Image: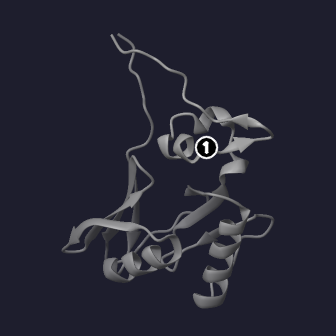
Amino acid sequence: MAVQVYGINHVVIEVDDAKKAVDFYSDVFNLEMLRGGEGAAWCKLGEHQFLAIFEVAKPNPDRMKHFGIMVRDAAQVNEVREKITQKYGLTVEPDSTCDFRDPWGNRMQVVDLHDESLVWLLPYREIQDLGISFDGVSVEMPSKTLD
């Protein structure tokens, strides 16, 4: 039987202060804390994924590795950009809409739903529930029965 992948379960980042990282990500993205303690934290990302935050002595940021967070629309991308630059003094990467490094050096990319292909959005129940459409085309999950 061929392996069937349904998506990504979680993304892990390294920080030197898990509590401050939870505060940052909760403030910027309104993330819900799932659990945490002893230098680790887990925050809900959408309906099916989570962000795992692990405290280490010295975070090791990478030049290109990054993860992307999808928000509803361009106004929310702008809200994130304004908050990270004005409140946190972070810099948006050149030639990007909203790529930045968090205070621990982890690179993030913030995109809105309209930046994404309809094919990638089909599994997201929250997108279907919102009734979002792109140029008159609704995002709906095809009905499928499981055997």
The residue at 69%/38% (across/down) is 117
Element carrying mark 1: loop
Does residue 129 appear to the left or right of 146 in the view shown? right
Q: Which residue is mark 1?
A: 131
- Find residue 23 and report its image quarter: bottom left
- Find residue 41 and report its image quarter: bottom left
Does residue 101 appear to the left or right of 33 in the view shown? right
Judge by depth and name the residue closer to the eye, 57 or 78: 78
**Res. 109 visible in picture:** yes
Quadrant location of the N terminus in the rendered image: top left
Q: Which residue lies most toward the left here? A: 38
Judge by depth and name the residue closer to the eye, 128 or 77: 128
Does residue 97 appear to the left or right of 146 in the view shown? right
Q: Amino acid at mark 1?
A: Gly
Q: Is residue 139 above or below residue 12?
A: above
Image location of residue 60, percent across then percent down:
45, 69
Coloring applied to the structure: one colour
The residue at 48%/40% (across/down) is 125
The residue at 46%/71% (across/down) is 30
Disc 1 residue crowd, few under 14, some 14–19, many 20+, Cα 10 Å = few
The residue at 66%/75% (across/down) is 79
Image location of residue 22, percent across then percent down:
37, 75
- Find residue 118 and report its image quarter: top right
Quadrant location of the C terminus in the rendered image: top left
Image location of residue 50, percent across then percent down:
38, 55
Judge by depth and name the residue closer to the eye, 5 or 147: 147
Q: Is residue 97 above or below residue 144?
A: below
**Res. 63 visible in picture:** no
| Count of residue discs | 1
